[in-house]
Image (spheres, rainbow, N blue to C red):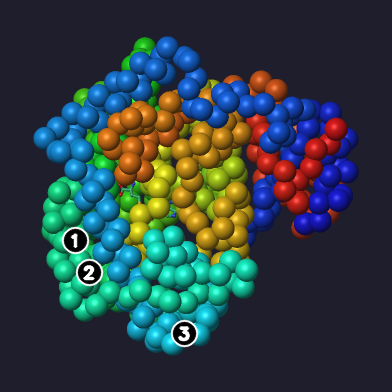
Amino acid sequence: MTPAPLGEALSALPEVGAWQLVPGSAGDTLLVAGPHGTAEAESHTGHSGHTGYASDEKATAAAAASGDSAVNGTDLAELPSLMRLLDETALLTMARVLDRTRLFRTPVPRTAADVVTALGAAPRHAWIVRRWLRTLTEEGRLSHDPATGHYQELTAPTRTEYARARRTLDEARHGMGYPESMTRFFLAAADRLPLLLRDRTSLQEVLFPQGETDTAEGNYRDSAPSRWANHAAAELIVHEARQREGGGRPLRVLEAGAGVGGTTEAVLAALSPAPLDYLFTDVSRFFLQAARTRFGTRPGLRQARFDINADPLAQGLAPASHDVILAANVLHNARHLGRALAALRELLVPDGLLVLVESCREHYQALTSMYLLMSPQPDEERWFTDLRAGQDRVFLTETEWAKQLDAAGFRPLPVLPPAGHPLTALGQHVIAGHARPDHGRPDPDRVARALAQLPGPTRPLRVHAVDRVPSTTTSGATR
Ligand SMILES: C[S@@+](CC[C@H](N)C(=O)[O-])C[C@H]1O[C@@H](n2cnc3c(N)ncnc32)[C@H](O)[C@@H]1O
C-alpha cells in the first residue's frame, strides 16, 4: 500500500500523532500512536527496565531466588568457560566447512557472495554464511577488507585440532547440564552443515530424530540456563496469580511457541494446585500433539495452534482475554516485533503480565545448528521488517527488548538474571512487562473505521495502538 493516501487519512485524526505501516504476507498492519508517540519521544522507563514499582522489585527478587534454587549444585562460575568451549568448537566447524570449498586455499580475495555460491547455500540461509564470515573475522581466523568487502587468509583447523575440539564438546555439554543427546545433535548438525545449508536435509530431522524430543527437552528444560530462566519465569507468574487472587476466576495464561513444554512444566508445577486456565499454543501441530501426550488431561489445560506472526483475533483469540502471556524462546521469530508485541498486548487485560525468555547474546554453536531453523521460509518474500531488517541477525539485546516492550505499551520489569549474576554472561534472560492501560493511545477501532473509505486492497488489515512507533520510510508523524 502506498503510504501517501494513508498518511492523509491519518492526518485528519487528531488522536493519531505517529504511525507505521508494517508489511505482512497476509496483509499490512498499521501501528498508531498518540500525539507524543514518535520514537524520539521520551520513554516511560528510560529503557533501563527499572520501573521503581515496589511490587515489580519484589516479584523479580523472588523470581531470581527461584532461578537460583533451580540450579543449586551447579557451579555457575564455570558456565561461561564451558560456553566458550562450545563456541570454539563451532568456530572450528565453520572454518572447516569454508576451507572445504577450497576458496581460501589460494590468496585470491573473496566476497561473501562467492562463498555462498561455492557452498551452494540456499538463498534463505545466505545470512548464516555471512554471519560465519563476520564471526571468523572477529575471532581472528579470517581477514576482511571493509573497503572492498573481500575476505581472505582463512585459518582452518587441522584434522587433529578439530578432532580434539569435538571431544571437548561433550565435557562442556555435561558441565552445562545438557543431556548426552545434545552432543550427538551438535556433532550431527556440524557433519551435515553443507547439506543443511543447501536445504538438502533439514535440521528438524537432526533435532527430532524419529519424532523424538529428548534433545530439545534437554535444551529448553534441563540445561542450567534454561532451568534458571524457566523457574524465574514461573515465579513471576506465581506472583501475578497472587496479585489476582480473589478475582473469582482461575488465572488465564496463554503460552505462545510452547514447543516441547520446557517452560510449561515449570510454570504448571509452580502454579499447582490452584485452578488454572492455560492455553498451550504453538505454530506447529507436532508440538500440540506431543503436549497432549505429555500433559494428558490436566484440568484447565488446552492446546491450540497460534502463530505470533498472524492476527490473534483472526485465530480465534479475544481481546483482553488473558492475565498472563508467556513466550519462551519464541518471540524473536516475530517478523516485526512491534506488531507482534502490540497484538499480544491487546490479548492481555489492563496491567496483565507478559513474560519472555530470550537469548540476548549470539552463540556460535547455534550458528552451526539452531540458526538453520530461524532462516526465512523458502517462499517468504521478506524476513524481519523491524529493527533487525537487513542486519543478518535474529536476537535483540536486553536494552533493545526493554525499548520494544516500552514502545508497544508495556511497563518493563527489571531484566533477569540481575546485573552481576554469573548467568548473565550466558545471555539467556527473562524479560517481562505489565500492559499499560490505554490512556493516551488512539482507539484502533475508530482509526480502522476512519480508514474504511480507503480502497479495499490498500487498507491495512489490522490496526494496533502502541505508545511509540519508530521512524521508518513507511511511517509518519501527523503533526
Ligand atoms: C526454541 S523453541 C521454544 C521452546 C519452548 N518454549 C520449549 O520449552 O520447548 C521455539 C518454538 O516456537 C515455535 N514457533 C516458531 N515460530 C512461531 C510462530 N510464528 N508462532 C508461534 N510459535 C512459533 C516453534 O514451533 C517452537 O516450538
Tell me the residue at 15%/38% (across/down).
75
Tell me the residue at 40%/64% (across/down).
140
Q: Which residue is mark 2?
A: 187
Q: Are marks 3 and 2 in contact (CB under 8 Å)?
A: no
Amino acid tagged 1 = Leu
Q: Are marks 1 and 2 in contact (CB under 8 Å)?
A: yes
Q: Which residue is mark 1?
A: 169
In this view, the mark in front (3 or 2):
3
Q: Is residue 91 above or below residue 355?
A: below
Distance in Å between CA atoms under marks 1 and 2:
9 Å
Q: Quadrant of residue 162?
A: bottom left
Mark 1 or mark 2: which comes first in sequence?
1
Tell me the residue at 38%/35% (across/down).
430
Does dot 2 land on a helix, a strand or a loop? helix
Amino acid tagged 2 = Leu
CA neighbours of label 2 inside 10 A, class few (<14), some (14 to 19), many (20+): many
Q: Is residue 170 left or right of residue 204?
A: left
Q: Is residue 311 left or right of residue 375?
A: right
Residue 265 seen anywhere in this rendered image of the structure: no
Residue 364, image x and y in percent?
35, 59
Q: Are marks 1 and 3 in contact (CB under 8 Å)?
A: no
Tell me the residue at 37%/12% (across/down).
246
Q: Quadrant of residue 268?
A: top left
Distance in Å between CA atoms under marks 3 and 2:
30 Å
Does dot 1 land on a helix, a strand or a loop? helix
Choose between 337 and 209: the one closer to the eye: 337
Q: Which residue is mark 3?
A: 107
